[in-house]
Image (spheres, rainbow, N blue to C red):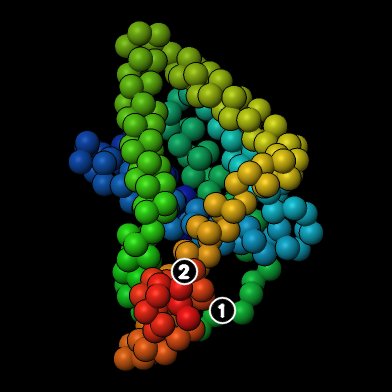
Amino acid sequence: MFSDLASAVTVAAIPLLHHGPGLGCGGLVALVTLLGTLRGFGDSAKRVLLPRTIATAGIHVTRATGLHDGMYRLSTLLGPPVAGLLITAFDATAVLLLDAASFAIAALLIALLVPGGAAEQRREPYLRALRAGWRFIGRDRLLLSVALMIFVTNLLDQAYAAVLAPVWASDVIGSATALGLLFGLFGAGAVAGSAVFAVLAVYLAATLAPIFSPVWRELDRSAGQRHEDQEQHERDPGDGEEDEQVAPAGVRSGGRGGDGLGG
């Protein structure tokens, strides 16, 4: 909620400063950077609400995540074309102020409709928990590979969405409507894919489970054991030998029995 309120103020500051004291390139970059930082915190906080929402709704997790992604893709389908038409009909200032108002409305809806839960007591400082998370990802080759892949694809996607496509729309087509339609077509494909996945996900999981479940179980068990080891080490840094005694068979090599089977 606070991230949405701050985002509303940041977006509204762009046209207000442009038509007021003046807004240079450096100031615009600073505001966009601040907005991106706020969206990172806000979007992550909203994702935390997803598991609780799924449990309350009582629907299948795979289907719920497909519907959640579909709603996000729907915004990419409708948002850019509507924005392009509004810029053509009015101007960029009016659209930015409307965008700021949408953030304020989102904050109001969260405050009114999302039930607040009891805050969990933080067991460790934020930076220490962040370092522990980075260490956990660094030790897991699968998670590290996925994170690097997403980093690279998002990097390329931002170059396309923030630079190449706007320059093409401005210099070649000369219309903001064309840019909105371009992103709208991308959103249409994404919505279609999410809808198909939401319908077929349960059946695909049942079909593919016999093939991939042994690999998934081993990966999940290995990752889970490393996470438990890390938590045990943070709780009892000097109790490494006891941690070795509780290791499950087949996961840890070099156990107390010396045969690599954990006893």
When the figure is inspected, residue 241 is found, relative to residue 44, above or below; the finding is below
Q: Quadrant of residue 81?
A: top right
Q: Nearer the viewer, residue 129 or 248?
A: 248
In the displayed structure image, the side of residue 176 where residue 78 appears, left or right: right
x, y percent for residue 25: 22, 36
In the displayed structure image, the side of residue 58 where residue 177 appears, left or right: left
Q: Quadrant of residue 20?
A: top left
x, y percent for residue 59: 77, 54
Tag shown at residue 119: 1
Circle 2 residue = 251
User: How many angstroms separate mark 2 from mark 1 (CA)?
Assistant: 35 Å
Secondary structure under the numbered disc 2 in the rendered image: loop
x, y percent for residue 192: 66, 28
Secondary structure under the numbered disc 1 in the rendered image: loop
Q: Residue at x 33, y 38 (%)?
A: 152
Q: Quadrant of the N terminus?
A: bottom right
When the figure is inspected, residue 87 is found, relative to residue 108, above or below; the finding is above
x, y percent for residue 173: 40, 8
Which residue is situated farthest in the top direction here?
Answer: 172
Q: Residue at x 22, y 37 (%)?
A: 24
Looking at the rendered structure, the kind of residue marked 1 is Ala
